[in-house]
Image (cartoon, coloured by chain):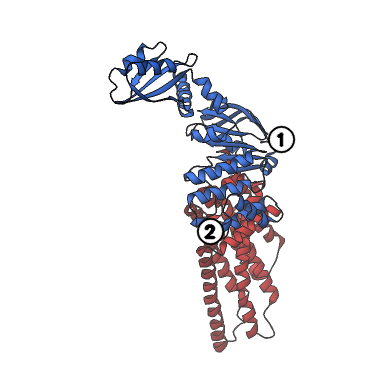
Chain colours: A red, B blue
Amino acid sequence: MRNIWTIAKREYDHYFITPIAYIVAFAILFVLGLIFLAIIQSSIQSALYSNGSAPNITVVNWWFAFMLMFGVPALTMRLLAEETKTGTIELLLTAPIRDYELVIGKWLGSFLYICTIIVVSLLYPIVLNQFITPSIDWQLVLSSYLGVVLVAASFLALGVGISAIFSNQVAAFFVSLITCLGLFFLIGIPASFMPPGSAASSFFSYMVMSTHFDGAFNAGSIDLSNIIYFFSLIALGLFAGTLAVEARRWN
Amino acid sequence: MIQVNGLVKDYGARRALHSITFDANQGEIVGFLGPNGAGKTTTMRILTGYMPPTDGTAIVAGYDIVEESLEVRKRVGYLPETVPLYTDMTALEYLKFMADLRHIPNSEARAYETLEQVNLKDRANSYIGNFSKGMRQRVGLAQALIHRPEVLILDEPTIGLDPAQVVEIRNVIKEIGKDRTVLLSTHILTEAQNLCDRVLIINKGKIVAEDTPENLQSRLVGSQRVVLRVRGDSDGLDATIKKVKGTRSIETKDADTIEFEFSSGQDVRPQVAKAVIQAGYELIEMRPVGLSLEEIFLELTQDNSAGKKS
């Protein structure tokens, strides 16, 4: 546990001296800012011409998850790939720490960094709350943010796992990006061509992340099956990463 | 402290280590000498728990390297060939990180202490990325020393250092070697000669010789070679030397310099000197040319490959 924390802390600190981490944070928060502005404006418009509805933070958070798809690979690509490239992996693999502690530590460091961005983005619901009486639906906000945290955690775990496999950061970036993209959208596409209710269709619609994010957390429902989905992805990513590190010892 | 028994390592179909066996005791500095690709780094990586052997066993600091890898790693300090440094950290941050990974209490104080040991205390807060090669090497060494390991494994510790730094690092290693076990690899032969209590010569994954540097030298030196210089005219000098019984392989090196050999058993130098002076030459120098470890090394590694071919 202590080793995981030591590794995580170094990674977390490291993000604050790398430009790429600032670029990711800026890009995410900038896009969310635009979306936030847009939903407030559209709410005002619709309020003028019709009955309208209160602006909703879940739109912002959908875009958050969308941006994570690009941001996470940029944050995770160097985590283990760079260590392999520069040879510092030799330092970590001969230090008295277990391979899984190294992988989990790397993941935790990047997760804490994303959590920092998430905390900053809490500004939006807080600001939104000022416009709405009696108040926004905090339960929905909580559920939606929990969803964002889980999306981030699972993307990061997969990114760390992929970074452990490659010694080239660019390769790690693109493979992570494709994996995130695939999970977020692509894997759900076959379901639309299949007879609804068939086993294959329900498999693909279970696999796609939007079922568990858009359709669950971001709609205000917290369900165990959705939590299990995300936890499985996290476990898969970290397990693959540990295996890749172990395999590195053998070649 | 280090007991290696029949270590074998295969990289795919290529066998990098052919059953290596040796040991190193506490308070001993053992040098691993061999050409590039001989298996030095592979052996060290196995002993430090970086990778498992294909076959064979090794006990380091009392623990089995495969079964109790974590216990071994706690007790071993390792400086790999490519010094593993985080260039975006300061020397102090880096050493503190390494100390934390090894659960050292007061990690910052220990980091300072170790920086002092390698003479880098005044650069503690500089980024490693701005360090010269020699300073990086010293930070790497500090990292290997930070937990006061029982066993120190150094892969080419003085490579890329300037002569003053080499002396400095060697002194640090000598100091540590007094009460701990040091295994270091090098292909600089004088280094092995200066530093090591015992030398293992490794070639093509096999240990071809193992002894103290002095014994290795005398074991292989069956004959003694001498350089002789005269002032002025040296015509006919070789013939004069040839006449003295026991001299052989006479070679004229320069107008005034000549080299010859004699069997170690019978020192013919006084006779040669007398003969040269009596022949009217002005003898100004006569000194032995020691067969250096370098030559021994070449002899051993070449013999080995020649033997393999036949």
Using the numbered discs, state the Cα–Cα distance from disc 2 to disc 1 in whole angstroms: 37 Å
Bin the neighbour count of mark 2 within 10 Å (Cα to Cα): few under 14, some 14-19, many 20 and up.
some
Disc 1: which residue: B62
Residue A158 in which image quadrant: bottom right
**Could one spot residue A241 in this view of the protein?**
yes
What subunit carries mark 2? B
Is B204 on the left or on the right of B101, as rendered?
Answer: left
Can you tell which mark lies on residue B127?
2
The circle drawn on residue B106 is: none
Task: Give the residue type at disc 2.
Answer: Tyr
Chain containing mark 1: B
Of badges 2 and 1, the one in the foreground is 2
Where on the picture, by quarter, is residue B177? Answer: top right
Tell me which amino acid carries mark 1.
Answer: Gly
Side (left or right) of B270 relative to B280: right
Label 1, residues with CA under 10 Å away: few <14, some 14-19, many ≥20: some
Say which of A31 and A112 sits in front: A112
